[in-house]
Every structure is written in structure tokens, then in C-alpha cells.
């Protein structure tokens, strides 16, 4: 290939890359009208739009310098490849973010979660952009993945580009964007960001190493496969982080987080006719996975934390089967679980090693969230919840938005966490009472029941919105 042919090839590929970047970033352009975006999502889209401008400006001048030196020619070809690969990575985030306008995400819930997180030392300026996913799951995009793509792009086009350091990316199923209570699981994904931001693993690594050393002494270590031995620290670290994030969700949202966990995994379906946990139905839910503790193990620890924080006494009388499965989980013990991905004796030892660790995980999440509790160790919202939960249920039972309450001959405003939890419990146990007062009092009509459940969430969302408009709204 002669010099002219090389020039034409580079010019063609540069123009193709330019078109790719321009088309990819076109969706990021914001306007002053519809759609409207939460501030954090708008910041993300603005950042991506700026990246595209820097990239396009660079590419417009790129073909003008075409060296004859083969090594330099190869370097420049590699530069084009780096730019394209960086934008292929960024492409993954764009449409999910564009789809997540204020009408397509639980805006008030995300605001509540953000305000709660900002009460934590070291998290005062964190913000979260909630974007969509086509998976029926919730997850957090590791900030390092996005930052690596941005850094690689900046190095290629010689631009000073930095991803906003306090912006976390969390994802929710696009089909569930209007479900207020279920989306409380976003608190777990925020927990991943906080776990990384506050370097919590650094405080747990030694405990994990000690737990493994104590469990797998030289005598019992004889039958341990060397490859598995090398994986053990990573396995326990993953389990520790997942448990941390579950408990973090409980600290942020109280019982509502645990109730959302029961719903997503359909754990209420595990109850036998006598009200105990069905051993056959629960078989997969007591198994630890490579990356996650068993689901019932996680719910057990969440429920125990609710007891520690003072919530359990306030919710345990609810007649919902969600509460019943949580009650049954309190009877579980470490011996109730297995790790079937390895042979049984080794699996039991690995779980035993984790049980030497999980109290330290719980202590770490307690340390991080200390500002959310009172001096006695209880959640600051529990006393208010105890005082207002029945009034909130009464309002919802009369199809009234419970943002301004008349209690003891005075008007009062519930804090968002109290409103969310009282409404969630009513959603689980009070729908039938609401249906009985309607013009179609048939609680067996599934379509009508679904409509009333949706209305309860809508009234709660409106209540949260009303409360945030108050000059001194609490969290």
C-alpha cells in the first residue's frame, strides 16, 4: 500500500469513526423541555455530550497528519482503534440513561435514598444517576469500568477528561420503573458504590484472611484443591460485600428494603401450609452461590438487623406473608445452609469461615451508617413510625394522600422513611380493607386488586413529593 492509499484508508476510517461517535452521542443532547431528567442523570448525559465534542474535534484534524514512517502510521491506526473501542464501551450507557427521564424512574425514591446517603460521613456530596436495564434485576455499574473508558479516550485525544468522581450509576429494570416499593432495592446498589467509595473492603480483608486461616488449618487443608484455595479470599470478599449492601439497604430504608427483597425473589412462596419454611421449595434458596450468599441467609441477617434497630417490634404484627417468611428466617442457623458448588464437607467449611466474618461485616456497615441511628442504637425513624403508622394507614384506607397528618389535635408531616414504611405495610396488609370500601368490593378480583395496589403506590409517591416541598423536610 503506497502513501496515497494509506492516506485514503486512514481518511475513510477516520470519517467512519467520526460518524460512529456523532451518531452514538446524538441522543445525549439535552433541551430545556421534554424529556426532563433528574440532576444526576442530566450531569451524566452532559458529560457524555462533552466527550463527544472533544472526540469529534480531534477526529476532524486527525487525517491531516499522515506520516510515511510505518511505525508512526501503525501508532495512529491504533489511536483510531482506541477511540472507537472507548466509544463502544460508552455506547452501553447512553440509551439506558436517555430512557431514564423523570417520568421513567422513581424520582422521589431516588431523592430519598440520596438524602439518606448524604447523612453518612464521607458521602455528603454523592449523587446517583438511575438508568434502565433490560434485565429483571438491579445492579450498580462499577465506576472503574466507566472511568477506564473515559481515561483511555482522554489519553487518545489528549484531552483532560474526568468522570464526575461522586456520581454513581445504578440500574433498575425498565419495566418496573413505576413500582415504588420494589425499587427500594436500589438501596443495595447504592451500597456497592458506598462500599467502594469508603474502601470498606480494606477494613475487612484481614478479618477474611483470619477467618479462612482459622477454618482451614493445615490439618483440614489437606483435601483442599489448590485452585479453590486461591479463590477462597475472593469468594468471601464477594459474600461480604453483598451482605454489607443488604444491611446498608436496611439502614437506609428500614423494613421496606427487606420487604422488597421478599417480593423480588418471591420468598413468600416458600411457606408451607403450616406456616413454616417448606424444605423442598426452599432448596435453592439455602444454597450459597459463587458470588452471593444464600437468599434466605441474606433475609435472615436483614431481619435480625431490623430487630436490633427497633423496627421488628413495630412490624411483626402485620398479617402479611412477607412478614411471616421473615419471622421464619429468624429460626435459621449457619448449619441450615450449603455451598453445593464444591463437595459438601469443603462447602460447609467455607460457610463456617464466612460465619467467622459476617459479624465484622455487620459491624462495618454499622460503623458507616452511625449517623442514621440515635444514641441508643435504634433507627432514628422508629419512634416516629410507632407514633404515626396507624394514622398513615387510616389515611390510605380512605384513599387520602398521607403527607399532612392530623394527630393529637395538631398537623404534622411524616418523614419520608416513616411514610414509605407505613405505606408499604398497608400495601401488604390493608388492600382488602380498601377494596371493601370501594364500589367493587370483591377482593378476589385480581385486576381490581392490582389497580388498588398501584393507587397506594401513587398516593405514597405523591406524599413523598409533597414532603420534599416542605422547607424543613426530614429524611
Image (tube, rainbow, N blue to C red):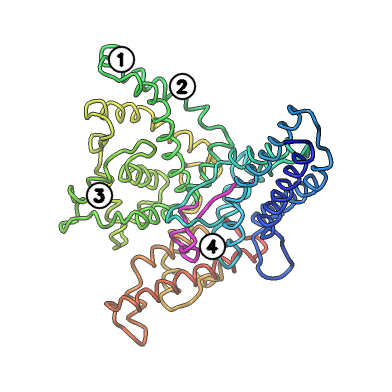
Mark nearer the N terminus (3 vs 2):
2
Percent of width and height locating residue 242 = 43, 40
Looking at marks 1 and 2 on the same chain, the residue that comes earlier in the sequence is marked by 2
**Labels 3 and 4: the sequence-earlier one:** 4
Spatial CA distance of label 3 from label 4 is: 31 Å
Q: Earlier in the sequence, mark 1 or mark 3?
A: 1
- Precedes in sequence: disc 1 or disc 4: 4
- Image quarter where the N terminus lies is top right
The secondary structure type at the circle numbered 2 is helix
Q: Which residues are magenta?
A: 167-186
Point 65% across, 62% down: residue: 37
Q: Are marks 1 and 3 in contact (CB under 8 Å)?
A: no
Q: Is residue 180 magenta?
A: yes
Name the foreground residue: 425 vs 50.
50
Give the position of the C terminus as an image quadrant: bottom right
Q: Residue furthest front?
A: 2
The secondary element bearing badge 4 is classed as loop
How far apart marks 1 and 3 lie (CA) works out to: 34 Å
Task: Give whichever of 45, 219 is nearer the camera.
Answer: 45
The reply to whether discs 1 and 2 touch (Cβ–Cβ < 8 Å) is no
Residue at the image point whose x is 77% and y is 51% from the top: 53
Q: Are marks 3 and 2 in contact (CB under 8 Å)?
A: no
Q: CA distance from mark 1 to mark 2?
A: 16 Å
Neighbourhood count class around disc 2 (C-alpha, 10 Å): few under 14, some 14–19, many 20 upward = few
**Mark 3 Cα within 10 Å, few/some/many (few <14, many 20+)?**
some
According to the image, label 1 marks what residue? 217
**Mark sitting earlier along the chain (4/2):** 4
The residue that mark 3 highlights is 328
The residue that label 4 is drawn on is: 106
Amino acid at each position: 500500500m503506497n502513501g496515497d492509499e494509506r492516506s485514503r484508508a486512514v481518511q475513510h476510517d477516520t470519517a467512519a469513526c467520526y460518524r460512529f461517535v456523532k451518531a452514538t452521542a446524538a441522543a445525549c443532547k439535552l433541551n430545556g423541555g421534554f424529556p426532563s431528567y433528574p440532576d444526576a442523570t442530566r450531569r451524566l448525559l452532559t458529560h457524555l455530550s462533552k466527550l463527544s465534542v472533544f472526540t469529534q474535534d480531534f477526529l476532524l484534524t486527525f487525517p491531516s497528519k499522515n506520516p510515511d514512517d510505518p511505525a508512526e502510521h501503525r501508532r495512529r491506526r491504533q489511536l483510531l482503534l482506541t477511540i472507537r473501542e472507548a466509544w463502544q464501551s460508552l455506547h452501553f450507557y447512553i440509551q439506558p440513561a436517555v430512557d431514564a427521564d423523570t417520568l421513567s424512574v422513581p424520582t422521589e425514591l431516588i431523592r430519598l435514598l440520596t438524602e439518606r446517603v448524604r447523612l453518612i460521613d464521607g458521602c455528603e456530596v454523592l449523587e446517583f444517576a438511575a438508568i434502565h436495564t433490560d434485565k429483571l434485576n438491579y445492579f450498580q455499574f462499577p465506576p472503574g469500568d466507566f472511568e477506564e473508558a473515559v481515561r483511555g479516550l482522554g489519553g487518545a485525544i489528549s484531552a483532560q477528561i474526568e468522570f464526575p468522581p461522586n456520581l454513581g450509576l445504578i440500574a433498575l429494570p425498565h419495566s418496573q420503573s413505576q413500582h415504588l416499593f420494589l425499587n427500594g432495592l436500589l438501596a443495595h446498589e447504592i451500597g456497592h458504590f458506598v462500599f467502594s467509595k469508603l474502601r470498606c473492603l480494606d477494613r475487612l480483608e484481614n478479618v477474611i484472611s483470619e477467618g479462612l486461616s482459622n477454618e482451614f488449618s493445615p490439618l483440614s487443608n489437606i483435601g483442599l484443591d489448590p485452585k479453590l484455595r486461591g479463590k477462597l479470599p475472593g469468594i468471601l470478599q464477594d459474600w461480604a460485600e453483598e451482605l454489607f449492601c443488604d444491611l446498608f439497604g436496611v439502614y437506609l430504608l428500614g423494613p421496606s428494603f427487606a420487604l422488597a427483597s421478599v417480593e423480588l425473589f418471591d420468598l413468600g412462596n416458600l411457606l408451607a401450609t403450616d406456616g413454616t419454611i417448606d424444605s423442598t421449595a426452599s432448596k435453592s434458596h439455602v444454597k450459597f452461590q459463587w458470588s452471593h450468599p444464600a437468599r434466605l441467609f441474606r433475609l435472615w441477617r436483614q431481619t435480625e438487623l431490623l430487630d436490633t434497630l427497633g423496627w421488628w417490634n413495630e412490624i411483626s404484627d402485620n398479617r402479611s406473608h412477607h412478614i411471616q417468611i421473615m419471622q421464619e428466617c429468624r429460626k435459621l442457623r449457619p448449619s441450615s445452609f450449603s455451598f453445593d458448588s464444591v463437595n459438601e464437607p469443603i462447602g460447609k467449611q467455607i460457610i463456617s469461615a464466612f460465619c467467622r466474618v459476617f459479624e465484622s461485616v455487620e459491624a462495618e456497615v454499622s460503623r458507616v451508617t452511625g449517623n442514621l441511628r440515635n444514641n441508643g442504637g435504634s433507627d432514628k425513624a422508629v419512634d416516629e413510625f410507632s407514633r404515626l403508622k396507624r394514622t398513615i394507614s387510616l389515611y390510605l384506607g380512605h384513599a387520602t394522600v398521607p403527607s399532612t397528618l392530623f394527630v393529637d389535635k395538631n398537623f404534622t408531616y411524616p418523614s419520608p422513611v416513616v411514610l414509605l414504611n407505613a405505606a408499604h405495610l398497608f400495601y401488604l396488609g390493608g388492600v382488602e380493607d380498601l377494596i371493601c370500601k370501594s364500589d367493587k368490593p370483591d377482593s378476589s378480583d385480581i385486576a381490581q386488586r392490582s389497580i388498588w395496589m398501584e393507587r397506594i403506590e401513587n398516593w405514597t409517591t405523591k406524599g413523598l413529593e409533597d414532603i420534599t416541598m416542605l422547607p424543613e423536610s426530614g429524611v
